[in-house]
Amino acid sequence: MLISPAYAQAAGGAGGGLEALFPLVLIFVVFYFLLIRPQQKKAKEHKAMLEAVRRGDKVVTGGGIVGTVTKVIDDNEVMVEIAEGVKVRVQRGMIAAILSKTEPVKSDKSKEKSKDDSGEAGKGKAKPKGKSKAKKSDNENDADDVAEEIADEDAPDTDKEDTVGNGVSKLKGLLGRK
């Protein structure tokens, strides 16, 4: 005959059950460190990001729509302006990313104190000429401050003073002030 007979191997020792369990435990440990733990960390960061959403933040929704948060309705919904005059309600959980954060509004006293200490208004700009802030109402002061902040964000780094001045004057014109 050309084929040799095959005989069964003798049974192994009693430690076979524990040795067979070791590869399964090793696979679980690898999955934990490569898959489960990073996903938990990412979910925790996303939850913290969603809790920090404020009015004025530029966000991207889960559907890819980019807009600015105009109002935080409650813990679950925000109002997002996606185009001029077009506002939509978005569930907070559907915000995928925050593109730019707004700074918290500082009190007027701290602004005046910082201006007096540094001798400058804002971020290295010269004080705007025209009406003094003492003669303006609080609402006009707030509108001017917001206009300057918007102009600062949109202005390129080169020729910043000129661009900021033009942006502020355009925004004041839109608001109906001279």
Image: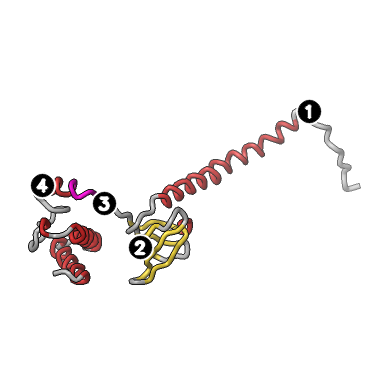
Q: How far, Cα to Cα, is label 1 from label 3?
A: 74 Å
- Secondary structure category for the residue under label 2: strand
The one of 138 and 152 positioned closer to us in this rendering:
138
Q: Are marks 1 and 3 in contact (CB under 8 Å)?
A: no
Q: How far, Cα to Cα, is label 1 from label 2?
A: 69 Å
Classed neighbour count for the residue bearing mark 3: other residues with Cα under 10 Å, few (<14), some (14–19), many (≥20): few
Q: Which residues are magenta?
A: 105-110
Q: Position of residue 17 (x, y in %)?
A: 75, 32
Q: Are marks 2 and 3 in contact (CB under 8 Å)?
A: no
159 left or right of 22? Answer: left
Instruction: Find disc 2 in the rendering and name its residue.
Output: 68
Image quadrant where residue 97 sits: bottom left
Image quadrant where residue 130 sits: bottom left
- Secondary structure category for the residue under label 1: loop
Q: Are marks 1 and 2 in contact (CB under 8 Å)?
A: no
Q: Mark 1 vs mark 3: which is more N-terminal?
A: 1
Instruction: Find disc 4 in the rendering and name its residue.
Output: 116
Which mark's residue is nearer the viewer, 2 or 4? Answer: 4
Q: Mark 1 vs mark 2: which is more N-terminal?
A: 1
Q: Mark 2 vs mark 4: which is more N-terminal?
A: 2
